[in-house]
Image (tube, rainbow, N blue to C red):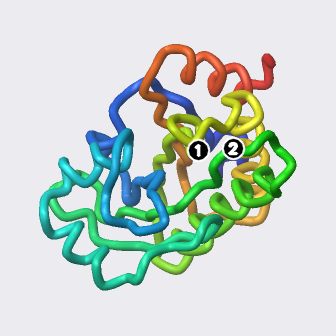
Amino acid sequence: MTASHTERITAVQDDITTQRVDAIVNAANTSLMGGGGVDGAIHRAAGPGLLAECRTLGGCPTGEARITKGYDLPATWVIHTAGPIWHGGTHGENELLARCYRSCFALAARHAVRTIAFPAISTGIYGFPLERATRIAVTETTRFLADDTEIEEVRFVCFGMETYRVYQAIVTGSA
């Protein structure tokens, strides 16, 4: 018997580069050449093979996703998605962020991913408001899991306590 879709969503406070899952999601920039925050941490932990493979992909437009091997990470795959930069909410940011999640799930389905870990996409240097981004993340995840029986766990990996608190409240429905 498959767990309900809400039972397959968790939030943890941890380092995404240490997650033993089939795929981790990288909150990448459009060049896929590494950067700061989670992107830089994933590139450092994965080793030079990740950057070499990313160079072959030709970048990634905002709202889309690309997949690479995990290299030195415990995850088999890295799904890179370029989230939107926050410009006040009047430039399609909500839809672009939602498309990031839909694109990641589409790649996960094509690569038989059963467990996937997401960071808080666009909430760091890109400035997307945390609660708004979290609600979009959880809504898109719930929609996908409602029709999917292959993914066993979607884990939101939160680097800081405030991010974890917001994700935990929204995932559990107490916010």
Depth order, front residue of 96/71? 96
Q: Are marks 1 and 2 in contact (CB under 8 Å)?
A: yes
Decide if residue 15 is on the left or right side of residue 62. left
- In 3D space, how far apart are the residues under numbered discs 1 and 2 (Cα atoms)? 8 Å
Depth order, front residue of 13/52? 52
Local secondary structure at mark 2 = loop
- Count neighbours of disc 2 (C-alpha within 10 A) and say few if under 14, some if 14 to 19, many if 20 or more: some
Q: Residue furthest right?
A: 90
Q: Which mark is residue 122?
A: 1
Identify the amino acid type marked 1: Ser
Task: Name the quadrant containing residue 61.
Answer: bottom right
Q: Residue under circle 2?
A: 86
- Expressed as whole percent of the image width and height from the top left, the position of residue 84 reads 64, 54
* Residue located 61% across and 44% down the image: 8
Is residue 126 in sight in this rendering?
A: yes
Local secondary structure at mark 1 = loop
